[in-house]
Image: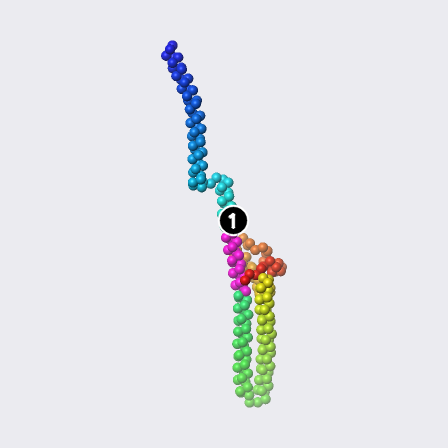
């Protein structure tokens, strides 16, 4: 009877000790785990859902900004290239006109040296008249071209895109090329001639 009571008392005491000890150990372990997790996060930068979403937004914004900058550079290069092509075309036309004038002048000179009768003389006069007409056309072209250059300089200083800088047709062709080279066609308006006036209004020139 005494042995049974002693065993019963020992079991009861063990349960009391266990009931006091186990919760403490669980609380201690849970606290240690939480503390270690916090320290690990601060050291390694371990991301939770909100952190991950925030940094993803930042990364996406950086990528978007880089894309926009790249697109702007492409736009500027493309439009600048188109303007240079237009200028080169005008210069080439001047060179062609000069070559035509020189050839006509040589022809007239040769004809005058070979004049032997009235018919040849009249033919030379007609050639001279044709040459004078060509000279007048070249003069008008040069005058208009110089006026376009002056207008281009004036409007460029005002940061206004004018037809003297690039014609509406050439501008639309340049915009179409830009649209094809960009991702998702990010131009503000469709590349239709009906929108050319709006494009001229929104495009600003930079030195």
For this rendering, which residue is in front, 120 or 172? 172
Residue at the limit of the structure toward the top, as seen here: 1
Above-or-below relation of 135 to 193: below
Residue 180 showing in the rendered view? no
Q: Which residue matches tag 1?
A: 61
Spot occupied by residue 117 in the image (x, y as percentages of width and height): 57, 89
Above-or-below relation of 57 to 189: above
In-image side of 184 versus 8 (left or right): right
Residue 28 showing in the rendered view? yes
Spot occupied by residue 7 in the image (x, y as percentages of width and height): 38, 15
Picture quadrant where residue 197 is located: bottom right
Spot occupied by residue 135 in the image (x, y as percentages of width and height): 58, 78
Residue at horizontal 59 percent and vertical 64 percent from the top: 155
Residue at horizontal 49 percent and vertical 41 percent from the top: 51
Above-or-below relation of 33 to 88: above
Q: Number of labelled discs?
A: 1
Spot occupied by residue 198 in the image (x, y as percentages of width and height): 62, 58
Label 1 residue SS: helix
Examine the structure image and report whether residue 73 is included in the region drawn in magenta. yes
User: Which quadrant holds the C terminus?
Assistant: bottom right
Tell me if mark 1 has few (under 14), some (14-19) or many (20+) residues whose alpha carbon lies within 10 angstroms of its own: few
Residue at horizontal 57 percent and vertical 66 percent from the top: 153
Picture quadrant where residue 165 is located: bottom right
Q: Which residues are magenta?
A: 64-83
């Amino acid at each position: 009877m005494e042995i049974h009571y002693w065993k019963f008392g020992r079991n009861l005491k063990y349960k009391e000790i266990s009931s006091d000890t186990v919760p403490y150990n669980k609380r201690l372990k849970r606290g240690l785990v939480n503390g270690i997790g916090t320290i690990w996060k601060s050291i390694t930068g371990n991301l939770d859902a909100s952190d991950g979403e925030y940094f993803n937004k930042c990364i996406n914004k950086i990528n978007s900004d880089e894309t926009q900058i790249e697109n702007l550079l492409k736009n500027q290069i493309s439009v600048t290239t188109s303007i240079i092509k237009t200028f080169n075309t005008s210069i080439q036309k001047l060179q062609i006109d000069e070559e035509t004038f020189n050839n006509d002048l040589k022809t007239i000179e040769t004809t005058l040296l070979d004049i032997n009768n009235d018919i040849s003389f009249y033919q030379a006069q007609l050639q001279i008249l044709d040459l004078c007409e060509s000279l007048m056309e070249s003069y008008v072209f040069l005058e208009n071209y110089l006026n376009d250059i002056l207008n281009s300089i004036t409007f460029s200083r005002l940061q206004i895109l004018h037809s003297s800088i690039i014609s509406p047709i050439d501008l639309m062709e340049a915009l179409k090329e830009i649209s094809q080279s960009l991702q998702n066609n990010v131009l503000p308006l469709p590349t239709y001639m009906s929108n050319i006036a709006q494009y001229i209004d929104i495009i600003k020139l930079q030195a």
